[in-house]
Image (spheres, rainbow, N blue to C red):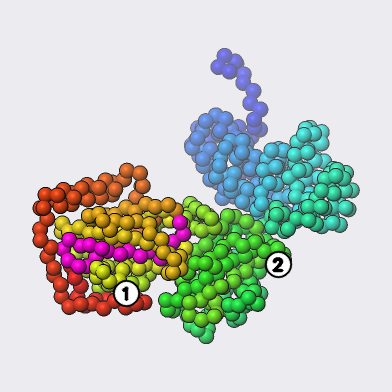
Amino acid sequence: ESHQSEVEITEASINSFKKLLEYIYSGCMNLSILKDEVILEIFSLSNLFGFTNLELSLCKYLRSNINVYNVCPMFAAARLYQHKELVIEALNFTDCHALEVLQSESFLSLSPEALQEVLNRDSLYAYELDIFRAVCRWIKANQDDEDPEAKIKVLSAVRYPLMSLDELLSVVRESQLVSSDNILDAIQLRNTLPSHKLKFRGQLKPNLNIAHPSQGAQVMQGEMRSALLESDSNGHDHERGCTRHLINESDSGIMIKLGHPSIINYIKIQLWDKDLRSYSYYIEVSMDQHDWVRVIDHSNYYCRSTQRLWIHPRVVQYIRIVGTNNTVNKSFHIVSMEIMYNSEEMNLVDIEKGLVVPKFNVATMDMNAIVIDGVSRCRNSLLDGNCKDYDWDCGYTCHQLGSGCILVQLGQPYMLSSMRMLLWDCDDRYYSYYVEVSVNMWDWELIVDKSKEPVRSWQLLQFNSRPVVFIRITGTFNSANEVFHCVHLEAPAQVPLDLNTAEVEQEISNLQVTNKLNNNELDEPESLETSSTTVAETSTAVAGSLII
């Protein structure tokens, strides 16, 4: 082109190119007076000629001015120039306005590949018959330049088993676009497959609680139904502010119907928590109230207070929560409930064997963990996240060697493979201990045994991944006195697990202790024992005087 006297530009109209020239000389462009098609042409030209700043500005403008008439050409341009954010914005808009977009004229201009990408989304929430009719319109509009293979691929994106028998036999068969064999296959699948195996479409409203009356949700089963979907989760007691059901084989639990079939991945429920009771339960979901799929099974785990439950994304309309145990009585109580597709926090967890694998510390008061047994001046100081402000008088939890332990209950079962804890280290003393875990307070597994080792300060604990609800830390030795002290606990460990700084420091510290032992250099243990402290069986005692 550099050797040509004239260069033909076919990517845009004269008007669009003039606007680009005006921008080159003036550095500004008034988008409010331009038509959508002109803005999209300038967007194309800015990419072609490398005007990066203009391209980004136009992308931002298009995202904030998306509508039914420009979404399809905008989506096509975003795909072509690989603007991921604009692609996502266009697809999300299409999902929310599916029928209007399917019936628009610009829909007919989509390429076969772009059309398939739209139709393949579970979140394209429209009746399948409307989707089929839109595909028929697209085929008719593009029949002159249509690749026969593209027509087959586009038609295959329609989910025929979601249609009724009458729709398949009348509308689909009469179109003569789908073979009789394919229609018969769809009928057979519809009649034989359980509903959870059908590939439903559902609304996708990220980070919005759809278990709310404003979204059409209603409680269909359970006592005191009106309480569950109310926003106030604080004003509850035995008689008000919670929905409940009797725990027995004949009671089918608490059931919620969502306003529309919806894609969800997160359920948050507030269990009644005015005392230290624990519950067990399971959750099932359905599209038709006949075929139920169990997505959460905590029937063998002790759970308390707020439950933050993650599942693999799926389309549901009915949710059923069935309590199987209450450590105090025979009723199952839920104070509040949220259901949503949570995209803001989904990167903080994984799912393994139906349980949450957290990437953040869940042994905190904010995550509803509590200290059941152990002595401290401040209740739950072990779980307050503060691992710096501690001294001889406060900032730690302890127990008498040979009697008791430090016992922590997490809010719900988690799949864990690591923990980290800080032993009191304001002097050179060293400790020995072991750690056990349980899901029900009856069956205990030993995960770490340092009862024969001299250790101090930070302890990084790694073990095979397993469900954990209760953590029991038992001290067996203190070189200074007869009390075991722990400052901080976190689960999982919030440090890298491969050759991290804490691990190196821990090994150096333990090595120093071992060398002192071998050389008999340790000072005589100093006991600062004052009056004894009683440990309550069900709560952490706030001691008037502790042993350091």
Q: Position of residue 47 (x, y in %)?
A: 56, 33
Is any atom of residue 198 visible in this view? Answer: yes
Q: Which mark is residue 540?
A: 1
Q: Position of residue 506 (x, y in %)?
A: 25, 50
**Label 1 packing within 10 angstroms: few (<14), some (14-19), many (20+):** many
Q: Position of residue 285 (x, y in %)?
A: 64, 64
Residue type (three-letter) at the residue carrying disc 1: Thr
Find residue 230 and report its image quarter.
bottom right
Q: Residue at x 49, y 53 (%)?
A: 350
Residue 191 sits inside the magenta stretch? no
Considering only order in the chain, which callout, 2 or 1, is on the residue closer to the N terminus? 2
Magenta span covers which residues?
466-485
SS for callout 1: loop
Q: Residue at x 51, y 38 (%)?
A: 54
Q: Position of residue 474 (x, y in %)?
A: 30, 64
Residue 467 sits inside the magenta stretch? yes
Is any atom of residue 233 visible in this view? Answer: no
Residue under circle 2? 289
**Label 2 packing within 10 angstroms: few (<14), some (14-19), many (20+):** some
In this rendering, the answer to whether 338 lies above or below 76 is below
Q: Which mark is residue 285?
A: none
SS for callout 2: loop
Q: Residue at x 47, y 63 (%)?
A: 413
Nearer to me, 172 or 417: 417
Q: Characterize the magenta stretch by its predominant secondary structure.
A: strand
Q: Residue at x 55, y 60 (%)?
A: 266
In this rendering, the answer to whether 490 lies above or below 234 is above
Give the quarter of the figure containing the N terminus. Answer: top right
Image position of 86 (left or right of 163): left
* Residues tagged 1 and 2 counted as in contact (Cβ below 8 A): no
Residue type (three-letter) at the residue carrying disc 2: Gln
Nearer to me, 74 or 19: 74
